[in-house]
Structures are given as C-alpha cells and as structure tokens.
Amino acid sequence: MKSPVVNMTRITLLCLWPMVMSANAFASTSTAILPPASSSSSLALRRHGPLSPPQRHNNNNYYGRNLNSKSTLDDLKYNRSRSSSSLNLHSATARAIAELIPRGGASASAAVAGAGAKLSQWSSTPNGAFNLALAVLAASTAVLKIGNRESGEGGADGAAVTKNPKVKELQIKFLSVFWLLRMADWLQGPYFYQVYASKSFGSATTSAMTWVSRLFLTGFASTALFGPLVGRLCDSNGRKAGTLAFSLLYSLGAYSTKSNLLGVLLMGRVLGGIGTSLLFSAPEAWLVGEAGEEGGESSLGETFGLAYAGDSIVAILAGQLASIAASSRGPTGPFEMSVGFLILGGLLAATAWKENVAGGGNDSGSKPTIRDAVKVVKSDPKIMLVGAMQSLFEAAMYVFVLNWPPAVSKAVGSYFSKFATDASSAISTPYGTVFSCFMACCLLGSTVFGQLTSSKKVDKDGKSKAVSTENFAVGMLGLATLAMGSATLSIAGKLPKLLSFLSSPGSLLAILVSSLFVFESCVGMYFPTIGTLRSKYFPDSHRSVVMNLFGIPLNAMVVTVFLSIEKLGTQGALGVSTTALALATLCGLKLKKLVNDEGAESK
C-alpha cells in the first residue's frame, strides 16, 4: 500500500502540468492593444447559485465590501445575457490556433517564432488568455482519456475485463436520471441573481441586493433545517420516491420565480432548499442500495467517476441552454426550461427505477429515526470522519464559489491594464470562459480519479494496482489545501521571501489562476471520492439522513462566512476555506490510520 505522499505526488503530476501550461497563457508582453470590449458574463453556480459579480471597473474596493451598497449591487448584476461564446473558443481563437500551424516550406525557427508571437498577442487580452487556458485543459483531459484507452486495462492474463451486464444496466439507469436532474439544477444557477433582482417589492429603502441576499440565505437555511427530516423520510419511504419528490419540489420552486409576491418567492426558496437536500442524497442512496442488491458494490467508484465527469459537461451545456432560454423568455426562461428536464428525469426514474428503502427493503416494522442516525454516527468514528470531510470540503467549496469572482477580477485588472491604451477603460473579465475552465478542470479531476482508483487496474498476478479511496482522499485533500493556500497568498500579494521574485502582477495572476484550476481539479476528484467513501462507511439503514445531518454544519459555515464577508473580505474568506481544507485533510489521515489499523488486526 502506497503512502499518501506517493499518492499525492501521482495526483499532482497528473493534473498540475496542464495548470502550469495554462498559466503560461498569461505570459508578459509589451505590445499595447486596445482595451477588450465589455462582454456579458455569467456563472453557473453550484447548488443554490451563489452571488458573484460579473466584472469590476474599479478593482480596488472588493475587500470589506458592503453587501447592501449600490456598488455591490452593480457588481452583482451579472448574466444580462448568456453569450454562446462564453463557454466555447471564439472563432477568432480557432483561427489563431490554425495560424499557429506552420505551412509547408516554413523553417522550424520561423514557425517557432511565429507561434511565440501569436501566443504573445493572444494572451494579451483576458478573453484570449482564458480561451488558451481552456484549450490546454481540454487537450490535457483528452490526452488522459486516450492514454487510458491505449494502455488497456486487463486481467491477469492480459485479456480485457468485461463489465458485468447488470452493472452496466444499473449505470445506464442511474446516469440518465442523474444527468437530467443535474441539468435542471445547473440551468437555474446563471440567472439566480437577475431573476430575483428583477422583482419589485414596493420598498424604496431596501435594495435589490438585500432581498436577493435574504432569498439566497433562505435556501441555505432550508437545506440545513429540513435536510435531516427529508433524509429520514427518504430512507423510510423509498429513495425513488425521494427522487420524484425532488422533481416536484424543484419544479414548484422554479415556477415561483414567475411571481412578484415576496411570500411566494420565499416559499419557492424553501422548496428549493428541501429539493437540494433530496438531490444530493436520494439518487445516491438509491444507487448504493441497488448496487448492494445486484452485487455491484465494487463498481460504485467507477459509477461515481462517470457521474461527475459527465456532470462537468452537463454544466457547460446548461450554460448555453440558459443563455438561449433567457434571450427568448427573459430571466425566468432558464427556470422554466429546467422544469422540462425535471419532468423528464422524474418520468424516467418513475418508469426505469424500482423502489428501495433503508436496509435493502427489509420491512422489520421499525423505521429509521434522526435520533437513531445520530447514535449510529457516534458509534463509528469512520462515519464521523467521512462526514467531517464532507462538511469541511463542501463548505470550503461554497465559500470559494462566493469569492473567486472578485479575486480573479482584481488580478486580471491589475495585470491586463498595462495593455490598454486608454487608462480610463475598464478591463473585462470573461467570467463565462473562466467558468468553462473550471468545469474543464473538474472533468480532468474526475478523469484522474477514474484512472487511479479503477478496480480494473491489475498486474500480471491479478493483484490490484488501484489506489485505495482512502489514500486518494488524503492526497486530494492535501493538494486542495495547498492550492487554496497559495491562492489566498497571491490575493494578499505577500509571498514568502523565497518567492518574492514572483510578486509582479503577471506572476500573481498566474499563481492565482493555476491555484484555482488545481482546486477545481480537486473538486472533480472530490465528488466521486466522497460518494465512494459514503457508500463504504455510511450504513444503508440511515444513509440519507446521515448524509443530511452533515449538511447542517456545512450550511452553517457557509452562511456564517457570507454574513461576515464585510469583515473577512475575499482574502479572509479564502483563508477560512484553506483552514477547513486543512482540517479535512487531518480527518482523511485519521480515517486512513483507522482503516490500516483494522487491516493489520485482521491479519
């Protein structure tokens, strides 16, 4: 069994090099250009669509900002339209790539010089630089995918391993429903702010930002308050029923956005928060229960890897569809479109899934309770450690979602301002393209997880070469901690003396972007990792309620940081994320030690 250090090294080598290559997109150049045209921006945000500004003309006042101020309101009015180019390489980008390819007869030195000039010119705008980064990330993921297929994964005799037909059928049933429901969730993210900011509640003294903040926090509070209860009902009455309930509640929440009544909007956010609890527990619990009955527990890691790799692609497609819907139906358009996917997912689950309840459908007369679930958590330290890893990592992730836009905008403005010929012109940050880069990183991370933990990886003697999920979790969490810590330091602009030569705006931007890309790759690794660990250590008798119990501290941490953002500022908030990730890493180390000790005792 390899040590966590070795595993972390392998993970780092697999995902860090494309991040470094992406950072090269921000190479310095002295050519002055016209300032980039302002482009519409948008974010497809996780779960509840947290608030974030699209671009900032003055990037010096983000830290300690007032959430109720008019300037913050202006900052946060993003997503006026979803440009199709925000999530794809622009046609100009494609032409630039083509021009980098030397034609016949050109000397090697001329080709290299020409390519360097083109890259320098391309990376002198924020949009071009992030498009280049996106191309590098996409190419890196493709190389990993192709390399995995070329290497081939066989058994002890070198023959290809045939997937169990029952496992394949289960994966098709689960993934088709899961991706439809996730599409509905992602569709609502980009226009969360605009749809609520467009409402008028007849109060001239209260800003739109205040109302949107209250509605946003209502969703988080609903998830924390009702999560354990809906988890218990899901375990008692069936995970399929819980998935169908999500489709219904989320549809009602989406339709509530068409109302101008504050009470209706608040109720819609409450229903959305309850639905979120179901989305992140019911389908997973159903999958694990069915895998237990079909004997497919060993393939759960592969299934989770496929689920979240596809989820990254779904998120990018959702951004495109949201733009189309908003352009034709206004800010409520994406919410209306999401209802269609919710109906499709619900119908498919109703027809293709069979019901399973806690304990594999064992009707002993007793139903799981929240008190029983708490006792179960207390009785097994491994459950407590996995749950703590879940709460701490996801809290850090949501805090990151709330704070990366101002951090990136400030760094982009500081570096690219030297290329603008008009000092008064604003530097546009291409948030849609940045988000696409993040999703490409998530896809890269889930690909790395699938390659290193695949149960099909065996040597000639038939012994598994796969990295254990516990070891992988430690390496992933440690890497995420380092990435978030370096991002926090780059925002402060105060690097250790040993790295003082990297204090220029270009270097700080490269460090920040690379760090955020590495962290997003860890996010892509995290979801299949935590899903596999939960399937291994959370008892099926209380699976959904235990998952939602750990959502309480998660949501409490996020809400606390959000309410304290004026005092913390962006750097302080990301510092909180770094601390949470460090604690999660310690929990992972403790879990690994317990598992190794139990393994030694069994021998």
Image (spheres, helix red, strand yellow):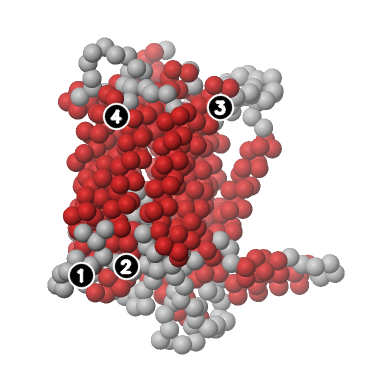
Residue at 30%, 58% in the rendered image? 258
Occupied quadrant, residue 229: top left
**Residue at mark 3 to residue at mark 1: CA–CA distance:** 52 Å
Residue at 42%, 24% in the rendered image? 354
- At label 2, which amino acid type do we have? Leu
Which one is earlier in the sequence, the residue at label 2 or at label 3?
2
**In the rendered image, which residue does mark 4 sit on?**
234
* For the residues bearing labels 1 and 4, Cβ distance under 8 angstroms: no
> In the structure shown, which secondary structural element does the residue marked by tag 3 occupy?
helix
Rendered location of residue 235, percent (x, y): 29, 26
Rendered location of residue 205, percent (x, y): 14, 72
Which one is earlier in the sequence, the residue at label 3 or at label 4?
3
**In the rendered image, which residue does mark 3 sit on?**
168
**Residue at mark 1 to residue at mark 4: CA–CA distance:** 39 Å
Residue 153: in sight, yes or no? yes
Rendered location of residue 595, percent (x, y): 37, 24
- The answer to whether 167 appears left or right of 204 in the picture is right
In this view of the protein, which residue sits in the foreground, 52 or 113?
52
Instruction: Please tell me whether mark 3 or mark 4 is closer to you in this view.
Output: 4
- At label 3, which amino acid type do we have? Lys
* For the residues bearing labels 3 and 4, Cβ distance under 8 angstroms: no
Instruction: Please tell me whether mark 1 or mark 2 is closer to you in this view.
Output: 1
Occupied quadrant, residue 25: bottom right
Which one is earlier in the sequence, the residue at label 1 or at label 2?
2
> In the structure shown, which secondary structural element does the residue marked by tag 4 occupy?
helix
**In the rendered image, which residue does mark 1 sit on?**
207
- The answer to whether 196 appears left or right of 189 in the picture is left
